[in-house]
Image (cartoon, rainbow, N blue to C red):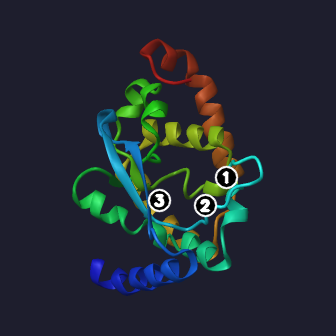
Amino acid sequence: AAAVLLPFFLAACVAVLVTFGRPMFFSQIRAGRNGIPFRLVKLRSMHSTRGADGALLPDAARQTALSRLIRRQRLDELPQLWLILRGRMALVGPRPLLPDTVAAFGAAGRMRPGLTGWAQVSGNTCLSQEEKLQLDLWYIFHRSAALDLRILAETLLVAIAGERRRPSRLAAAAHWLAAERPALLQRGEPA
């Protein structure tokens, strides 16, 4: 896979260097399996432009047409393959979150995060943080080899056709969470 992806990754690196300059990579501490922190690395896909108030502009205002393409094709995520090989991430799993966020998750936060997952193939950037969390929790409690294979196949489709909200999945996750909330609270899981 590395040999096949290398030319695409190198092209994305050149595009990032020409478009954004240095640094080419974005890194941030995220929580891994059992809450153990690790440094997540991605290709940089946004300017660091700030508004008059000093706050970063919204993501859409800091991207270019080229960086949107890089993100859509998931080329910005390729450095994470190294993290998968090192055992810090899984190929499929819940999104890698900030340590403070995962600390509040109880046992659900102990799972190894993934490069792709149920939230990513169900709308990703078209979803609110709450919707992503509901999808991640649904995945954690319903994961299986068959579901992981489905997610991998759908990841390729998303890279080709683009992201779109999946209302039926959102409804299923919300319904499941509402039904399971008392049991989750009793076990110390997030609700």
Image x and y of residue 17, in percent: 48, 79
Residue type indicated by callout 2: Ser
Total of numbered circles in the picture? Answer: 3
> Residue 18: percent from the left, percent from the top?
53, 83
Name the residue located 55 percent from the left edge and 74 percent from the top edge: 20
**Circle 2 residue:** 48
Circle 3/circle 1 CB separation < 8 Å:
no
Task: State the mark number for residue 56.
Answer: 1
- Could you tell me if residue 1 is visible in this image? no
Marks 3 and 2, the one that precedes in the sequence: 2
Q: Is residue 47 visible?
A: yes
Which residue is nearer to you in this view: 153 or 95?
A: 95
Q: Which residue is mark 3?
A: 151
Pick the front one: 94 or 62: 62
Q: Amino acid at mark 3?
A: Ile
Residue 56 lies left or right of residue 21; in this view the side is right
Callout 2: SS: loop
At a point 55% along the width and 75% down the height, the residue shown is 70
Kindly state the secondary structure of the residue where label 3 is placed.
Answer: helix
Instruction: Find numbered disc 1 in the image and state the secondary structure of the residue it sits on.
Output: loop
Q: Amino acid at mark 1?
A: Leu
Task: Check the image and report above or below for 130 versus 96.
Answer: above
